[in-house]
Image (tube, coloured by chain):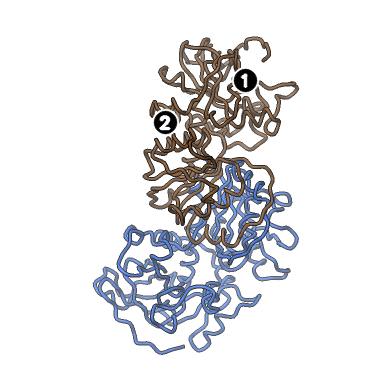
Chain colours: A blue, B brown
Amino acid sequence: MVEKPRPDPGEGEALVRTLRVGVDGTDHEVIAGSHGGYPKGEDHIVLGHEAVGVVVEPNGTGLSEGDVVVPTVRRRPNGSNDYFARGEPDMAPADQYHERGIDGAHGFMSEYFVSPAEHLVHCPPELADLGFLVEPASITEKAIEHARASRSAFEWSPESAFVLGNGSLGLLTVAMLRESFDRLYCLGRRDRPDPTIDILDELGATYVDSRETPVDEVPATYEPMDLVYEATGYAKHAFETVEALAPNGVGALLGVPSDWAFEVDGGALHRELVLHNKALVGSVNSNVRHFGRAVESVAALPDWFTDDLVTGVYGLDEFERAFDDDDTTIKTAVEFGSR
Amino acid sequence: MVEKPRPDPGEGEALVRTLRVGVDGTDHEVIAGSHGGYPKGEDHIVLGHEAVGVVVEPNGTGLSEGDVVVPTVRRRPNGSNDYFARGEPDMAPADQYHERGIDGAHGFMSEYFVSPAEHLVHCPPELADLGFLVEPASITEKAIEHARASRSAFEWSPESAFVLGNGSLGLLTVAMLRESFDRLYCLGRRDRPDPTIDILDELGATYVDSRETPVDEVPATYEPMDLVYEATGYAKHAFETVEALAPNGVGALLGVPSDWAFEVDGGALHRELVLHNKALVGSVNSNVRHFGRAVESVAALPDWFTDDLVTGVYGLDEFERAFDDDDTTIKTAVEFGSR
């Protein structure tokens, strides 16, 4: 924890008092030094990219004092560029963005932050406590949007979805997909009793233990999947996804693996993609439009689900606990203030 | 060559007098026995899936005698199914279609054929000589439609396209893409002088010799590609495509390889798909809608191009020559009659 001056909003920026900031796997990677980097010329980065706060100084932006807002993550590195100009910074190539709390720009784990109003998304006040779930939900909104777009040239009526990974993003995604898919499956590698498997049971999803049923055997053991959502970052899963898919299915890829060479039956995978009209769609980050939809998705989550998903919200006096990563921890946040 | 009775059209079917039928790589695979199969209970299959003909007996279908028509390829195997009912047999899984001239149903290399009117696409009479190019063009129409659909959730303004393979389908595709891409590239492995490279030069496309520049080195040597169109069926190309793509780019996969295991840097490929929002879209066959657009695309091809592309049209007395497959042969057809 460090002392920093309260930031002054520049032109077009609002000053926001932070309520809560969620913790996810990316934070752990930033802490480990395996992902992201400090702002230029600085010797540290303020963590945090899943924030919710209250506007305290609208500063002529059109926002109102007391508005509950969620900030998006990507910012212009210097000057504007086409991707930001059209509201699609999520599609910018690597040298044309910073990511707050991750790469090149300070994040939101501080009592106050400033942000251009265009990067702040309104959140209903009653959702203030759960607003830190909007950013991860927006990641899923974008991935599913792109996956569906890839199937929009024909009549696609998906029924089965398979989420790889029973971490907080996987569980959130299963919950978000529950209205639009008849049958949901989620991959993990844990023994019962386990709190994440309990949540899957309650959601009506089928838990698939990867130690018993590898991803490519899922069609034979369960059923071929219309949608596969891969967020583990385990590279072999990206390839096995092709075999897990039903004809005309799509795999949304979100995990970020390191280099790892291995053998694949490239001919069979290539042929399977072609002869069954399958697609793989990579997706990273999200934009204001996805955040807007994510606000609605988070608002629609059942209370029991968010109660079980959020295993801890910790004040600054015990913030380290929010970074625990054991089998009883699902989703945590650091609390900086209340409304 | 065998004698068969002239077919009688059933209800909803028209009798068509065949004009020309094109030959492609699939025909060679069917002849070699490596793809497709005979109609059930028969000891042969009539070849040919790239046909154009003239309606001689409309048989109450709404077609008129003298209409020039191109037949689509897939047919109901027995009874109907949802894919055929909604005009998307190209999206049917393997057990829900036959392919005329390829798998389970006789093709069009005969003086007459019958077809349900719903599987016949009108062709302007002046295009009768080139109507056999409509089916291959429809394959590209579908692949590009699906590739573009996968990029429809954001603003995508592609400028560069890279066609893998300088066979007849590759050249036809380069010609079809010439209006919508600023810069076109086509991969081959031949020395100049070569008739296919001459066509690429004339189209303003850049010939990429795969022996000098492997697909994954194309971004460094030329530029990253917004669209890659893979129709060689060489499985390594499907994976190298990920590296050849620009951020937000899409690879359309059409080739059909056999099993072939090899090592890939799966981590790097997976990461590249995710962090740069790339997609791979498999595509097979095509439907009436794609045939309709293909008629327009073929009509828009320059005369010099079709003159150079079609290296031979042979009557029944020398039909074997249409199956030659040497370096001077690009596209051939068998001629069964004239208008």
Real-space Cα distance between discs 2 and 1? 29 Å
| Local SS, label 2 | helix
Figure disc tally = 2
Pointer 2 with pointer 1, Cβ within 8 A: no
* Three-letter code for the amino acid on which mark 1 is drawn: Glu
Q: Is residue B146 above or below residue A319?
A: above
Specify which label sits upstream in the sequence, 2 or 1.
2
What residue is pinned by disc 2? Answer: B297
Q: Quadrant of the N terminus of chain B?
A: top right
Q: Quadrant of residue A106?
A: bottom left
Q: Which mark is residue A3?
A: none
Q: Is residue A251 above or below residue A15?
A: above
Q: Which amino acid, by three-letter code, is at mark 2?
A: Ser
Query: Mark 2 or mark 1, which is nearer to you?
Result: 1
Residue B320 got which mark? 1
Residue A294 visible in the picture: yes
